Image (tube, rainbow, N blue to C red):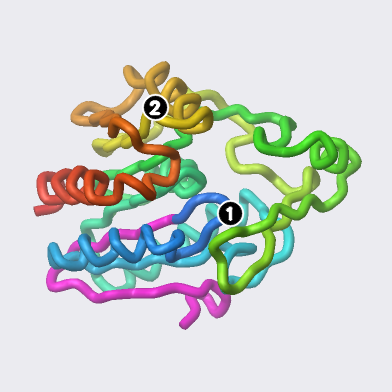
Amino acid sequence: MTLDGRLAYDFVPGSGDSAILLLHGFLSDRRAGGRFDRLAFEYARLGHAVLRLDFSGFGASPGGVVDGARLLDDAAVALDHLDSLGYTRQVLHGHSLGSAVSLRVAPSRPHVVTLVLTGAVTGAGQGDRPYPFFTEEQVAAWYRDEDVLLPLDDSPIRSHVVVNRQKPRLGADGTQEELLGAVTTPVLVVHGDTGEQEQALAAVTATGAHLLPPGSEIVVIPGATHTFSESQDALATIVTDWVRKHVP
């Protein structure tokens, strides 16, 4: 199945007017190595419709070089689809890259009632800096405007994701104040406390905690890494409790 004739997706109808859109992280896809399978099941068990898609350039969706502007359009296409089906209470659950997309599309979507952000990227203003996990060789290629191929470990469809400095990067402009200040619905942010990447992201969120909308909450799962692979039970409990509260 495809959305807009191009985006690969999975959809489970709900029993009411509520729906969850799951947006995956970088170097991942709509299954997230099985982690989104678990979350989709838990959300559907609550009676919500669940939609998850492969961003352009990821999974089974077409696309060569990752383009930040296209990622935002992908999310808008998915939310338009939920609108067309009559789901007027929508939750954006974004992981890592998906959280950055969620924060940027939510302010313009009146049916989004809350955000769930895991391994969240709550900062902004990345400028022309390359991705932090690049090797020295990849950094050099980036500044030569060459395609940089990033291998995938858990995708049965793609062997790599391609990035290039000439394509817009998500969050290249703006500040954290502008990004978080634009959101008006309550936000649940879930971080782990293990691993350099997750600790750095959690520190960014802590810096901007006062900018989150009223009713928002930040939860840290002890021992969890950026993927939450070893903490799926704890994560499922936290996010479903939040959705029960905000989308009964």
Q: Residue 78: in sight, yes or no?
A: no
Secondary structure of the residue carrying tag 2 is: helix
Q: Residue 76: in sight, yes or no?
A: yes
Q: Residue at x 53, y 53 (%)?
A: 72
**Up/down of 150 relative to 143, above or below:** below
Marked residue nearer the N-terminal end (2 or 1): 1
Residue 179 place in picture, x, y as percent: 46, 31
The answer to which quarter of the image holds residue 16 is bottom left
Q: Residue at x 87, y 49 (%)?
A: 146
Please say whether residue 19 is one of the residues in the magenta stretch: yes
Residue 223 place in picture, x, y as percent: 33, 33
Label 1 amino acid? Leu
**Up/down of 70 relative to 196, above or below:** below
Residue 142 place in picture, x, y as percent: 82, 41
Q: Which mark is residue 181?
A: 2
Please say whether residue 197 is one of the residues in the magenta stretch: no
**Residue where numbered disc 1 is placed:** 27
Q: Which residues are magenta?
A: 1-23
- In the image, 218: left or right of 28? left
How many other residues sit within 10 Å of disc 2, few (<14), some (14-19) or many (≥20)? some
